[in-house]
Amino acid sequence: MRFILLVFMCIVQVRAIFNIRDFLPKITWNTRDGNEDDFAGYYEKGISVTGRVFVTMFGYPSRCEKRGLYHSCTLSFACWMVGGSSQFGCGASPWIVACCVTAKKPLNDIPPSKNDNERLELREASSTVLQKRIDDSGYEEDDDDCGISTDRLFSKRIIGGKKAFFGQFPWQAYIKILSYQCGGVLVSRKFVATAAHCIITAKLKDVLVYLGELDTQDTGNVEEFAPAELHRVRKRIIHPKFRYRITQPDRFDLALLELVTEAGNFFHISPICLPDGDMKLTGRNAVVAGWGKVQSSNELMGTNILRSATVPILDIRECMTWHKTRRITVDLHLEMLCAGHKNGKHDACLGDSGGPLIVLEEGRWTLAGITSAGFGCGEPHQPGIYHKIPVTAQWIKRIIKTID
């Protein structure tokens, strides 16, 4: 319904842009070459008056930031009509609501208004826009649009989860290794993170990475508006502290797969954001997604449709206590975290290993964990066990910076 309304609004906005000359005063604007550009005035008024109203009606921001400059959030078709480039940055697919980047002067260059109220509105809008993330490692996010889903709203609710829709998890990777599967997550255009135990013994020629996938069998039961990408792996990098353990969760269960070719820059394929090392996770709700089992019985071994579930992140001591109530002794360490419900039901399971556990951090979906292990699936007092990404985020960033 929201998509239909947005399409309708797009048509209305296009008409408004063409008709806005009839009721707006003519404004001239000096271009960078010194010539006056009448249309620039119409453009700024048309976008700000019509587009900003429509997108804010649906909860999207009125402005966006690209490389330190601010632009308007508007409906994508209207952006195209004025010669703009529709890009991510407004919290939705750029096919619908776009960060409209044009050759005209960005919003930063708009001459100061004589109206104090207008200046105040601009300052308030600008303060809510995310700045590019930089940390002490020297790593800088190479993708301004990390962590942006086609829809920012995840319903409450993979064991006991719900089906995902196309483009909801654009960083999700489906990893096929001969007769078994794992999950993964795109952390840059060239790297996919996954669980080390998934790929440590595999031959690279047998590892296939699918990006932008929703239905692995292409049954036609769900809408897929663009094809998935198939990638080969050039190199695998196992975390140096990884240690395989038979009866306990693996230590530092993390690996990076370097893709032979870079991932495409599409709305349904984009990287997840990487956290800073001090991100607090305990007590927060997270989302886990994957193509693993959807029931704890042995009858259903997996799903062809990507599914997701919302799970709370637990204090590690509480996690150990929960397991003790089931007479399970679990050896947990600081590079691990637990997430799950006391009564079970919502959980990651077989086939989900390597997939992402994500949290919403300052408006961006950020990688919190990598699915690693669990004693059973969706069982009471037996939450899923994940590798804790904030502990190893700097290692990931160094690898990306070195090779990219």
Image: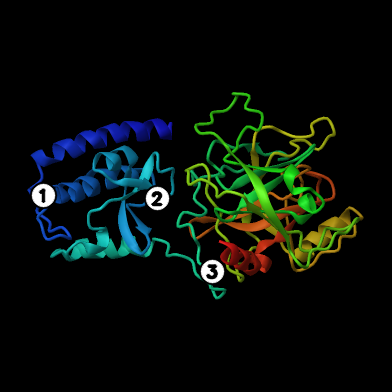
Amino acid at circle 1: Asp
Amino acid at circle 3: Tyr
The residue tagged with tag 2: helix, strand or loop?
A: loop
The CA distance from mark 1 to mark 2 is 27 Å
Give residue 112's quadrant in the image.
bottom left
Mark 1 Cα-neighbour bin, 10 Å: few <14, some 14–19, many ≥20: some
Q: Residue at x 29, y 65 (%)?
A: 123
Amino acid at circle 2: Cys
The residue furthest bottom is: 136
Task: List x then y, in percent, for residue 399.
Answer: 63, 65
Q: Is residue 347 visible?
A: no
Give residue 17's quadrant in the image.
top left
The residue tagged with tag 1: helix, strand or loop?
A: helix
Q: Quadrant of the C terminus?
A: bottom right
In this rendered view, identify the residue nearer to me: 323 or 35.
35
Q: Is residue 294 visible?
A: yes
Give residue 118's quadrant in the image.
bottom left
Q: How is the image coloured?
A: rainbow
Which numbered disc flags the more N-terminal residue, 3 or 2? 2
How many numbered marks, from 0 up? 3
**Seen in the image, is 353 located left or right of residue 40?**
right
Name the residue that disc number 2 marks. 90
Mark 3 Cα-neighbour bin, 10 Å: few <14, some 14–19, many ≥20: some
Task: List x then y, in percent, for residue 98.
Answer: 36, 45
In the image, residue 261 sits, relative to residue 248, either above or below, namely: above
Which numbered disc flags the more N-terminal residue, 1 or 3? 1
In the image, residue 216 sits, relative to residue 367, either above or below, namely: above
Name the residue that disc number 3 marks. 139
The CA distance from mark 3 to mark 2 is 24 Å
Q: Quadrant of the N terminus?
A: top left
The CA distance from mark 1 to mark 3 is 42 Å
